[in-house]
Amino acid sequence: FYLSWRQDFFQRAHAFVVRQGWLSQWTANVDVWRKLDENIFGSYWRYPRDHALSVLFFALGWSMGVVEIRLILYFLHVPAGWATAVAIEALSILVDQAFFYVPAKIGTQEGGKYFIFLLLGLSPVSGFALGVVRRLREIAWVFVGLLIFAYYHYISRHGSTPLMAEPRRVPILRSGDLQR
């Protein structure tokens, strides 16, 4: 926030690079650095309402993670309050960021929750269970997304939805039609 408020982060970076004598081919045009400030931080200045709404909705989205953890802990019969749920969510985000390079967070979510619960003095088995429940939630949403993708893929291939397709004519068999 401070750097965006100052409105000159890249210009200051340019001055630093010029003082150090680094990368002379990049420091020749100061207008490029000024445009970087304008393009990256300019939206903060031009659209402060949109920026505030973005921060607000991010905070609301993050708080839904806290609500989710609190509900899961309730159903797992883990005696933990809202402050514990906030701590678990914050530490979970820290673990996710530390192990961002692990494909599909394989094992990091469950192991991270195990470690977090151990740190907080809660049952680590409950932490592992929390990680598994959150993984199952993620898998369920991936499945829903794949179903939606398959539906739209079908429409693009066949031109109509499977629900609105023409019914097939099925021949009606009569008793005389079945001969051995």
Image: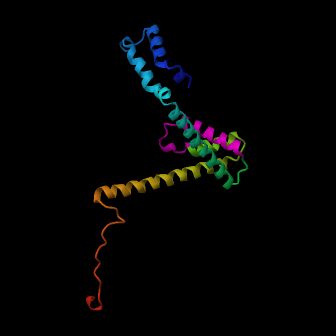
Residue 9 position in % (x across, y down): 49, 19
Residue 146 position in % (x across, y down): 42, 54
Residue 134 position in % (x across, y down): 57, 50
Residue 180 visible? The answer is no
- Looking at the image, which residue is at 52% across and 37% down? 54
Residue 51 position in % (x across, y down): 52, 33
Closer to us: 94 or 127: 94
Question: Quick check: 74 left or right of 26?
Answer: right
- Looking at the image, which residue is at 29% across and 57% down? 157
Closer to us: 118 or 40: 40
Residue 163 visible? The answer is yes
Q: How is the image coloured?
A: rainbow
Closer to us: 168 or 60: 60
Quarter that holds the C terminus: bottom left
- Looking at the image, which residue is at 71% across and 51% down? 78
Q: Main secondary structure of the magenta part?
A: helix
Count the marks: 0
43 w.r.t. 109: above or below: above
User: Does the magenta segment cover residue 107?
Assistant: yes
Range shown magenta: 81-108
Q: Quadrant of residue 37?
A: top left
Question: Quick check: 125 left or right of 154?
Answer: right
Q: Residue furthest bottom?
A: 176
Question: Quick check: 39 left or right of 160?
Answer: right
User: Does the magenta segment cover residue 10?
Assistant: no
29 w.r.t. 69: above or below: above
125 w.r.t. 94: above or below: below
Quarter that holds the N terminus: top right
Closer to us: 70 or 124: 70
